[in-house]
Image: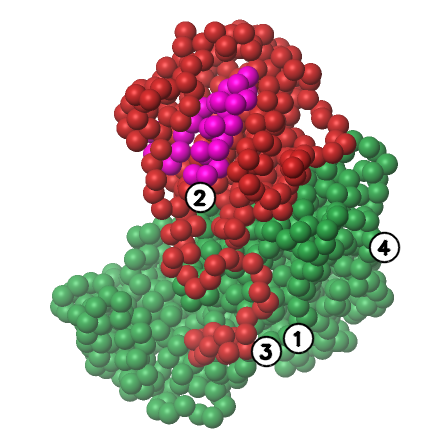
Amino acid sequence: MSNPFEQEGVEIAWCPGCGNFGILKALKETLFELGYEPHKVVLVSGIGQAAKLPHYLKVNVFNGLHGRSIPVAFAIKTVNPELLVIAESGDGCMYGEGGNHLLHAIRRNPDITVVVHDNQVYGLTKGQASPTSEEGFFSKVQTLGNLSTPFNPLSLAIAQDASFVARGFSGDIEGLKKILKEALSWKGFALVDVLQPCVTFNRVNTYGWYKERVYYLGENHDPSNRFQAFEKSLEWGERIPLGIFYTHRKPTYQEKFYTQIPRSHLLYQGTLSEESVAREFQLLV
Amino acid sequence: MVDWEIKVGGAAGQGVQTVSEILSLMLKRSGYYVFSLEDYQSRIRGGHTFTHIRLSDRPVWAAKRYLDLLVCLDPLTYQLHHHEVKENGLILGNFGLGEKSTDSHRFISIDFEKEAVQLGNKVFANMIAVGAISSILGLAPELVAAYIEKIFAKKGEEVMEKNKLAFQRGRRIVGIPPVLPTRNSMPNDVPQFLLDGNQALGLGALLAGCTFYSAYPMTPSTGIMNFLASKIREYGIVVEQAEDEIAAVNMALGASYAGARAMTGTSGGGFCLMVEGLGLAAMTEVPIVVINGQRPGPSTGLPTRTSQADLAFVIHAGHDEFPRFVFAPRDPQDAINIVRRAFYLAEKYQVPVIILSDQYLADSKVSYWNLEMEEIPDAPIQASDFSDYCRYALTPSGVSPRAIPGGKALVVVDSDEHDECGHLTEDLDVRVAMHEKRMKKWEAMKKEIRLPFLVEGKEVTLLGWGSSWGVLREAREELHEEGIDAGLVHFNELWPLPGGLREFLEGLPFPIVVENNYWGQLANLLEHETGLSFARRITRYDGRPFLVDELCERVKEVLRNVQSV
């Protein structure tokens, strides 16, 4: 059986060799292997090269504003919990422009997966520093070298007790698929930060650079141990851990909401009935 | 005929708004028509706040400046407002050491707080005042007990009982017989309903089948969120307090894309943050209703006061060009139907609809004999089971069949320019076709718009929009009674402007445009759109609404100036 998520005849606007291709392939195969149907999946993205990904899959797509994919994804899942909802975009979109939404989505714990293409650089605007760029990173804008230190998405998410926190590498598609399978099947907010080389603008964090450093968290890592997870999230440099850092199963926003109200979705069912209108008017008497 | 103006003032935290709430209900129950407005400061304790209540035997739509009764919960109220009391008017309360300025007023000195302390806590001062006022107005005490129970039920038996005691104490110590005829039973021809603008806006959304409201708290629109939140359990709706207005509008769009009727509400500053989202709504053609409760700006401005200065902003807000509706309800009753109509038209044309409320409308309570439900058709989503679906299929009307995700149709929407199937494109011919598709809706949208309300007059014509309806309507009547043949043109549907407007407005005698802003934004808009001149403008931008008698004076002043030239 061919993969129903395969989008035929589409011209992909990424640079040859871009790390985005690995993420696209991993996501497409994961969705198929988990048995999802395209019309039950919604991909929400922001703006940037990474945010074009939904167009290269056969799914429902909401390609919205820069930084704003998470509020949109939250609302879609809340209105129709039957849908699988994935927000995906780049590190500038998710950690920069939309950083505030990430913080508050963790608090809400909606049952969505957030996949972040983290290449430590701005691609589409041609090479400026991103929130995850190393200190000292030089660009046409950061002419003194980046004066800011990098944002650590994993530490932040673990500190905020996010329900599921993982890191993958687009250079290892099979490894990434394993993580995505867990993340998509997870009930609750799942953050997957994906290290992704930018072959055009990031000459430091290349495929080779990553391959020398990345390793998977082993059996002795306990994702339910928040302190251990946090400690691991700080490791960066000579060795860079990949895998599922932290999990904490807790009621999702949708679970908490739907157990308290008399419906299973919020789809429009027509205007209020005459009896309800009469009841509401009576309250104003 | 009874037609009284009452003002009750005090510091924030003294419970002035509770006085307004209980008194308005009691008066309505006693058969009076009621109009009330609230004036408060952006603080939680202290400062000065007042409620202004008008009661009458006939329907009332606005307030007047000069008072029959001033109730002072603190001395500052006396200092600030005693000059507004009519000759022979009554002043009740704590005047402090303030000089009683004139012999032409009747004074009843009661230190409400001191009385309340004797009952155990100064918080009961407001209920003592309610008791005193109800006695002066000749209202039956039984009417109040029920409301006290309703309002304080959640706070427990003791608080309820103490408040009842406070109420009775107020009635006892007032020391004069009722000034108005005693009202024990309800007459037949009494107003049935009492509601404020925010309740009405929320109710309109509920009736329209809205199940998703996301917003960030911001005065004066927070009341909409409070209203809808009180309905969550019963109707199963989401009321999500977003982290900011950007999230609020994007959530509403996500909800609408997924198939809910969704709305967000804010004030001007929050609307500024939503503007990119407004463009997203236009580009993705996802229906949305946005309420902007206006307050004076720019920037934070006067957070708790009123204004009509966002008209020019909201009709143009957003980069590039796109069609939208802009409505401005006249009063709470109108707000119910405007919101219902907004949802219908947002869905029918797949465009954003902006509703301009303001603090005056949001917080003002009006009583009605009847609430009328305008006949509004339904607009179901029909294409979700189409296979080979393209969200932006080109059609003669520019409106494509809408689907929601979950059915056979794959729904692809994009903030980038996109092709018929929603995928991003830089094919400039496609861009032109898509832009024309979106803009094409405009002509049909224009036909939806109704001509403004019109009462013809031979000498002068007042023009206005939105919440000024009540005051303009009463001012016109009052001018008429004074022998000035005044007419009225009033807009509640502002954008697009209706076709045939030039012919409609041409030849109106002596037009004067009345607005709560500096420029005269409606006047400018009408000049621009019709080529006619609207040079005479009465504006107010101190954060307070027009009052009937004040407005009449200003109209007469304009007329006098013309005659003296």
Position of the C terminus of chain A by quadrant: bottom left
At x 55% / y 61%, what residue is drawn?
A: B210
Q: What residue type is labelled 2?
A: Pro
Which residue lies under the disc numbered 4? B396
Q: How far apart are marks 4 and 1 (CA)?
A: 27 Å
Q: Which of marks 4 and 1 is nearer the N terminus?
A: 1
Which amino acid lies under the numbered mark 4 shown in the image of this protein?
Answer: Pro
Eye-nearest disc, 4 or 1: 4
Same chain for labels 3 and 1? Say yes or no: yes
Query: Relative to B521, is B114 on the left or the right?
Result: left
Packing grade of label 2 (10 A; few <14, some 14-19, many >=20) is many
Along the line of sight, the residue nearer the viewer: B166 or B442 = B442
Chain holding disc 1? B
Residue drawn at x 41%, y 7% as measured from the top left: A238
Q: Distance between the Cα atoms at labels 4 and 2?
A: 40 Å
Q: Do the residues labelled 2 and 1 touch (CB within 8 Å)?
A: no
* Structural distance between the alpha carbons of marks 3 and 1: 9 Å
In depth, the one of A141 and A28 nearer the eye is A28
CB under 8 Å between discs 3 and 1 = no
Q: The red chain is which one?
A: A
Q: Position of residue B504 (x, y in %)?
A: 81, 68
What label does residue A110 carry, if any? 2
Q: Name the residue under label 3.
A: B372
Q: How crowded is mark 1: few (under 14 residues within 10 Å), some or many (20 or more)?
A: few
Question: Which span of residues is magenta-colored?
Answer: A158-186
Q: Could you tell me which chain the residue with mark 2 belongs to?
A: A
